Image (cartoon, rainbow, N blue to C red):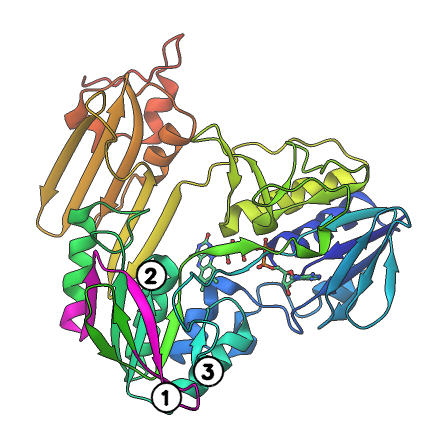
C-alpha cells in the first residue's frame, strides 16, 4: 500500500504514526512545504529568542526513520491528479498514492488594507521563514504594529516587545482576545501589556499601510485618520486553508476540505485532517474549520488509522478550548466568552488574583473563563464539551471535581452532595 501525506504538521505527522502502527509494511511518503519539522505554536518562542528553532521540533529526531517515512521536504503539491491517483509537485515530479492524506494546513490571511501587498516589511506569523523575515525587519526598526489582537497577534506582540521593540496592537473588536475572553478577563492582560509598554488600540480598523518610495513600511493609518509610525507590520488576522491545489478536482471544498467523521473527503481514498479541512464542530454543531493543534493531532490519528484499513470515528471535535499564559497570568476558557442573549445566565466569582465566569443555559454550562486560579479547568471543560447538565447550585460550580462524576442521575446530571 502506498500512502502519500501532504504536510508535516501536527496532522500529517500524527497520521504517519497512526498508519505505521496499523500497517507495519506500507510505503509512506511525506511531502512537506516545510523543510524542517517544527510546531507552529512554538514560533513566538523562536521569534522572542526564548527557544532555538531546532527546539521547536515536536517529534523525536528519529521519528521518520523509526516509522519508515520517506521525507520530501521543501516540496509542495501544486495539483491533485485524482484520475491518475497522484499529485504534481512544484519540483516537477509526480507522486502517486493508493491512499492520500491532505494535511496541508493553512496560510496567514492578509485583509484588504491599502498597500498590504506592496509593502516590504509586512508579514504573517505562520512559518519559520516568517520568523526569520520578522527578525530581520525588527533589526532595522524600533516600532512594530500588530494587526489583530487574537492569540497569534498577542503572541507576536509579546515576542517583539521582548526583543526591545515598541509594539502597538490594533484590534477591531472592543478588546483583545475577543474569541477567547470577555472584556474583564481581557482587561487583565491589557493592563499587563501596557505596563510592559505594549500599546493597545481596540475598536479600531487599519485602513492603509504607509510606504516610502522604495516600498518600505513607514507607518499605518487607522480609519479615524490616526497615523502610527512603524517599520514593521505583522498581520495576525486569521488563516485560510491551503486548498488552491485542489481547484477543479472532485475533492469538495467549502472554507476548507470537506470531511466526514472518518476524515474522508468526497473522493474515495482521499482523506484530510487539521487546519486544511472543515468538519462538524461539536460545540456549535456546525461545519467549520477547527484550526487548533489538539484537533489537528486527533484528526490526523483518525485519518491515519482509517487510511490503513481501520474504522475510527472522530470523537469530541471540540474547538472551543483555549489556554494562555502571558507575564505569569494563566487563563483557560471554554465555549462562549459572553452570554449571547437573556436566555443564558452568567455567574461571576472574583477574588484577589482570580476571576471565574460561568455561562449556563437550561442547566448546562455553555461557557467558562477561569483566570488566575485555573484549578478544576478539566472538569469544567468536560461539562461544556459534553453538554452535561451540571446539577449543582451555581455557587458550587468552581468546586466541581471528577469525584462528582460518580454521582450521576439517569438524565446524565451530576448530583453534588452539597447542593
Ligand atoms: C504562531 C502560532 C501560534 C499558535 N498557537 C496555538 C496554540 O497555542 N494552541 C493551539 O491549539 N493552536 C495554536 N496554533 C495553531 C496550530 O499551530 C495549528 O492548528 C496546527 O499547526 C495545525 O496543524 P496542521 O498539521 O493541520 O497544519 P500546519 O501546522 O499548518 O502544517 C501544514 C503542513 O503542510 C505543508 N504544506 C502546505 N501546503 C502544502 C502543499 N501544497 N503540499 C505539501 N505540503 C504542504 C506545510 O509546509 C506544513 O508542513 C498556533 C498557530 C500559530 C501560527
Report the image quarter containing ligand 1: bottom right
Q: Nearer the viewer, residue 138 or 70?
A: 138
The residue under label 3 is 120
Q: Residue furthest left?
A: 352
Q: Is residue 218 left or right of residue 94?
A: left
Q: CA distance from mark 1 to mark 3?
A: 10 Å
| Precedes in sequence: disc 3 or disc 2 | 3
Residue 383 point in image, percent of width and height: 36, 28
Residue 181 point in image, percent of width and height: 26, 47
| Precedes in sequence: disc 1 or disc 3 | 3
Category of crowding for the residue at label 3, using alpha-carbon neighbours closer than 10 angstroms: few (below 14), some (14–19), many (at least 20): some
Residue 205 in magenta stretch: yes
The residue under label 2 is 148
Q: CA distance from mark 3 to mark 2?
A: 19 Å
Look at the numbered disc 2 and give the secondary structure of its residue: loop
Q: Nearer the viewer, residue 307 or 61?
A: 307
The residue under label 1 is 212
Name which residue lies at 42% across and 77% down.
Answer: 47
Quarter of image, res 35: bottom right
The stretch of residues the image draws in magenta is 193-219
Name which residue lies at 72% across and 66% down.
Answer: 76
Quarter of image, res 385: top left
Amino acid at each position: 500500500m502506498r500512502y502519500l501525506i501532504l504536510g508535516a504538521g501536527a496532522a500529517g505527522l500524527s497520521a504517519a504514526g497512526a498508519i505505521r502502527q496499523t500497517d507495519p509494511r506500507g510505503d509512506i511518503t511525506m511531502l512537506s512545504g516545510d523543510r524542517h519539522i517544527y510546531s507552529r505554536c512554538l514560533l513566538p518562542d523562536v521569534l522572542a529568542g526564548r527557544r532555538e528553532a531546532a527546539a521547536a521540533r515536536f517529534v523525536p529526531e528519529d521519528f521518520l526513520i523509526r516509522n519508515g517515512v520517506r521525507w520530501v521536504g521543501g516540496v509542495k503539491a501544486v495539483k491533485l491528479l485524482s484520475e491518475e491517483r497522484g499529485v504534481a509537485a512544484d519540483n516537477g515530479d509526480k507522486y502517486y498514492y493508493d491512499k492520500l492524506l491532505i494535511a496541508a494546513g493553512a496560510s496567514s490571511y492578509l485583509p484588504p488594507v491599502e498597500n498590504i501587498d506592496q509593502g516590504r516589511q509586512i508579514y504573517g506569523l505562520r512559518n519559520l521563514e516568517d520568523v526569520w523575515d520578522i527578525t530581520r525587519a525588527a533589526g532595522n526598526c524600533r516600532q512594530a504594529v500588530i494587526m489583530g489582537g487574537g492569540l497569534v497577534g498577542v503572541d507576536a506582540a509579546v515576542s517583539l516587545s521582548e526583543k526591545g521593540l515598541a509594539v502597538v496592537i490594533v484590534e477591531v473588536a472592543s478588546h483583545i482576545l475577543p474569541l477567547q475572553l470577555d472584556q474583564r478577563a481581557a482587561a487583565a492582560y491589557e493592563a499587563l501589556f501596557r505596563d510592559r509598554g505594549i500599546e493597545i488600540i481596540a475598536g479600531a480598523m487599519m485602513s492603509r499601510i504607509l510606504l516610502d518610495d522604495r516600498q518600505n513600511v513607514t507607518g499605518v493609518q487607522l480609519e479615524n485618520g490616526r497615523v502610527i509610525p512603524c517599520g514593521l507590520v505583522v498581520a495576525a488576522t486569521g488563516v485560510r486553508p491551503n486548498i488552491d491545489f485542489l481547484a477543479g478536482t472532485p475533492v469538495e471544498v467549502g472554507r476548507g476540505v470537506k470531511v466526514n467523521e472518518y476524515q474522508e473527503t468526497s473522493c474515495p481514498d482521499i482523506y484530510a485532517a487539521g487546519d486544511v479541512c472543515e468538519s462538524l464542530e461539536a460545540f456549535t454543531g456546525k461545519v467549520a474549520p477547527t484550526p487548533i493543534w489538539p484537533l489537528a493531532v486527533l484528526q490526523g490519528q483518525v485519518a491515519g488509522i482509517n487510511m490503513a484499513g481501520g474504522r475510527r470515528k472522530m470523537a469530541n471535535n471540540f474547538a472551543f478550548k483555549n489556554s494562555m499564559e502571558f507575564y505569569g497570568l494563566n487563563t483557560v476558557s471554554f465555549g462562549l466568552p459572553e452570554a449571547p442573549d437573556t436566555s443564558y445566565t452568567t455567574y461571576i466569582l472574583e477574588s484577589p488574583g482570580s476571576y471565574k465566569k460561568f455561562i449556563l443555559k437550561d442547566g448546562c454550562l455553555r461557557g467558562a473563563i477561569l483566570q488566575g486560579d485555573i484549578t478544576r479547568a478539566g472538569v469544567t471543560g468536560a461539562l461544556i464539551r459534553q453538554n452535561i447538565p451540571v446539577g449543582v447550585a451555581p455557587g458550587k460550580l468552581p468546586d466541581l471535581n471528577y469525584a462528582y462524576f460518580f454521582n450521576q442521575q439517569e438524565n446524565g446530571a451530576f448530583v453534588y452532595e452539597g447542593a
